[in-house]
Amino acid sequence: MSLHILIDGYNLIRQSPDLRNIELRNLQEGREALLDRLAAYMEVKKHRITVVFDGMYAEDVLERRTTWRGINVIFSRHGESADDVIKRMVKKEREKVVVVTSDREIAGFAYHRGAATISSPEFEHKMKMASYLEAKGLGTMNGYDAGWSMTTRKKGPSRRLSKRERRNKIKTDKL
């Protein structure tokens, strides 16, 4: 099953040193650099990706939606922040989505609605690892844990994550 990854676009750009430098030169180039990296990641991992950008100060009254090499791109409408759009989508999809943001408010909101969350730097690291493994010919490493099977050996409650944290970990490990 592929995941739906919902990304706070400007948050991811500004948390990444490389993308931040590109964005400082030109906002559009920063967005395109992020979308290019996400498109490469999507080719490897095959997850559905939606990136939400702030259009709060844009002149458009309506929310704009477009696609970029298979990635859904949403610009929030005038007077609405990307955070509001992300929260609306999380309310709708709940546990079906993984939210990529370092914004504590959005991460907390998503977590309490059952969605998995991952910080922007962590996700960027996972993107880099996926492209590295693809370049080395290891692909998605399906054979890496194919021989592993879950055991019934109990570890005790003090070392076990909560049910919600285990679900979150399973989803983020797929990234």
Image (tube, helix red, strand yellow):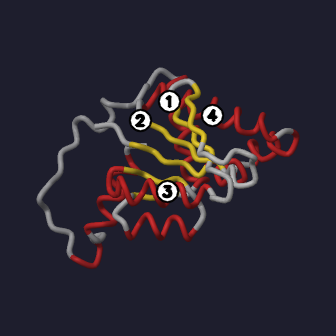
Residue 103: horizontal and vertical position, in percent?
60, 65
| Nearer the camera: disc 1 or disc 2 | 2
Q: Which residue is mark 3?
A: 118
Q: Is the residue marked by circle 3 packed among few (<14), some (14-19), or many (20+) residues within 10 Å?
A: many
Q: Secondary structure at mark 4?
A: helix
Q: Which mark is residue 35?
A: 4
Q: Secondary structure at mark 3?
A: strand
Distance, label 2 to label 4, CA atoms, is 14 Å
Left or right: 72 in relation to 161: right
* Badge 3 amino acid: Ile
The numbered mark, 1 or 2, whose residue comes first in the sequence reads: 2
Q: Which mark is residue 133?
A: 1
- Residue drawn 30% across the image and 62% down it: 166
Q: Which residue is mark 2?
A: 47
Q: Is the residue marked by circle 4 packed among few (<14), some (14-19), or many (20+) residues within 10 Å?
A: many
* Badge 1 amino acid: Leu
Distance, label 1 to label 2, CA atoms, is 16 Å
- Residue drawn 20% across the image and 75% down it: 156
Whether the residues at callouts 2 and 3 have beta carbons within 8 Å, the answer is no
Quadrant holding the N terminus: top left
Q: Residue furthest front?
A: 61
Asked if one can make out residue 156 in the rendered structure from this viewpoint, the answer is: yes
The numbered mark, 3 or 1, whose residue comes first in the sequence reads: 3
Left or right: 110 in relation to 114: right
Distance, label 1 to label 4, CA atoms, is 20 Å
